[in-house]
Image (cartoon, rainbow, N blue to C red):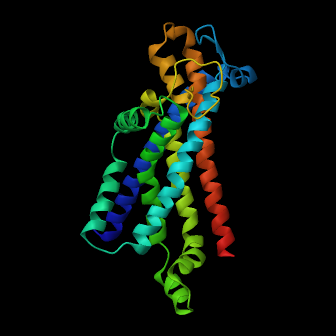
Amino acid sequence: MSKEIKQAIGFAILRTAAFLVVFILALIIFDIARKGIGALSWDFITEAPRNGMTEGGIFPAIVGTFYVTVITALVSVPLGMFSGIYLNEYAQKGTLTRIIRMAIRNLSGVPSIVFGLFGVAFFVQGLDFGTSVLSAGLTLGLMTLPVTITASEEALKTVPRAYRDGALALGSTKWQSIKTNVLPSALPGMLTGSILGLARAAGETAPILFTGAAFFLPNLPNSPFSQFMALPYHLYILATQHHAIQKVRPLAYGTALVLIVLILAVNLAAIIFRARFRNKYNR
């Protein structure tokens, strides 16, 4: 068999696999949209649940998801980016650095429920933050941190070595060369990885299940130490734990559709940020 035939077969397999993944994803989104579009309305977006969550809307859950995502971003983005910069630019090659990288990669694969249990032990009980927006946000921040570190480090690796050497040859310090030559080129990839990590965190249920999410709270959280409603947990309750599952099934599909739209919006923001930064620094 010639190399051309092998290459054609390989590309055909890859295209088929990609098509199947996209087709299945589109099928799932279409089914959720078809069943949830009827529940969407202005009242559904702006009102609180009523009558045992069988009526009303999901506004407190939307706001709670936003609050906890903001805390997650404040924790994971700066820590993740600076950790990636240290590992790629400053850390000495050796056994310790390899162990740290291996630990970070392993943490990326830890189930989210484990981070939730850690959040209960450390933030809720150890630091006495209680079940709150702060505990949930910090837990999600730790869960997202390995992804942000890895994405930042990989983005920095794509920057040619000549960018650093050229700045150093002109008398710049190491940090000046990183700030002026390396970061502008690596920032699109770093931001993209960070935003995608936040999108994953916004859809997680297990970490917030133990650390702050509430079944029903008609009022918005008034401090970082308040409990909150969140879209993933709200959807989990409507789909599996509600006393009238069949009655609230349309509301569950509507909640799922809103959550998908929000996550897609975050992913779209990542694409736009990456494109703008690339165009800016290419010029």
Callout count: 0
Split into 4 quadrants, where in the image is the C terminus?
bottom right
Q: Quadrant of residue 280?
A: bottom right
* 88 vs 243, nearest the viewer: 88
- Name the foreground residue: 131 vs 253: 131
Can residue 203 be seen in the rendering of this structure? no
Residue 277 left/right relative to 126: right
Q: Look at the picture and state if 181 lies above or below 260.
A: below
Asked which quadrant contains residue 63, the reply is: top right
Which residue is more in the foreground, 164 or 82?
Answer: 82
Residue at the outermost right position = 42
Q: Position of residue 223 (x, y in %)?
A: 62, 32
Indicate the quadrant where residue 102 lies: bottom left
Which percent across, then down, holds residue 215? 52, 19
Q: For the point 53% across and 88% down, which residue is it?
A: 166
Give me the residue at 41% from left, 74% from top.
90
User: Residue at image x 37%, y 49%?
Assistant: 108
Q: Position of residue 261 (x, y in %)?
A: 62, 36
Residue 269 higher or lower than 162, as above or below: above
Asked whether residue 82 is in view, the answer is yes
Which residue appears at 44% of the width and 58% of the height? Answer: 149
In this view, the residue in front, 130 or 230, is 130
Q: In the picture, which quadrant includes the N terminus?
A: bottom left
| 167 with respect to 9 (left or right) | right
